[in-house]
Image: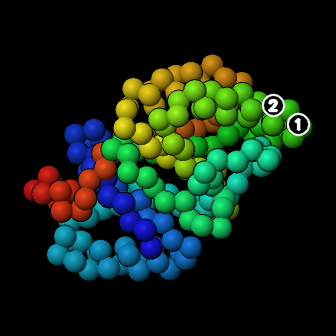
Amino acid sequence: MILKTYSLVGVRGDADFMFWTISRRLEDFQDFVSGLFSTELGKYLEIPYSYLAITRKSEYIGGHHHLGQEGSPVIQEPGEAKYLFVYPFTKKREWYFLPFDERRVVMAEHFKIGHKYPSVRIHTGYSFGLDDQEFVLAFETDNPADFSDLVSELRSSQASRYTALEIPLFTCTSMDIKELLSILG
């Protein structure tokens, strides 16, 4: 299992840290959380949010490929960026009633905007049938202003008309577990 640790201290009132866990087996997540709760620290912990998703290649990409693209047989690992922005995402039902070719055109505009921000790397998780939301989006960058500019520009894209939910948003700072534990006191 892959584990990345992040601080949310000072940026969210309802969560102090985030663990990004990646595995092909659900049991690994259950074992991890069970083990965590059995530690001394575990009796003080609550899990206010938990999102489950899988990766796969977007149906809108077609033959377009990127290095480390989602949906490859190899797990796409998080990078070494300092910041991570994570949120659950759900589309309006009307989106799924649009003809596929129309959705593909809308998403091509969406991807084109994303390509204007190469310092922001996206990880798209698909939650259909696994969790309450449809997607879990995670964006890595060393420059939070780039992510903010990307989100701002995406607000005026056609795809944004079909957004039903994209909160809560988690602004995370990457840090190793020892540093994270020390700032928690």
Q: Nearer the viewer, residue 124 or 45?
A: 124
Q: Nearer the viewer, residue 163 or 145?
A: 145
Name the spot of residue 143 as percent of width and height, x first. Answer: 37, 32
Question: Mark 2 = which residue?
Answer: 105
Q: Nearer the viewer, residue 18 or 165?
A: 18
Q: How many marks?
A: 2
Question: Mark 1 = which residue?
Answer: 101
Q: Is residue 131 visible?
A: no
Q: Is residue 10 left or right of residue 150?
A: left
Residue lying furthest left: 185
How many C-alpha atoms fall within 10 Å of the one at disc 1: few (<14), some, or many (≥20)?
Answer: few
Amino acid identity at mark 2: Val
- Image height check: is 7 above or below 102? below
Q: Is residue 178 left or right of residue 74?
A: left
Task: Tell me the SS state at disc 1.
Answer: helix
- Image height check: is 76 above or below 170? below
> Residue at horizontal 36%, vertical 42%?
83
- Image height check: is 165 above or below 56? above
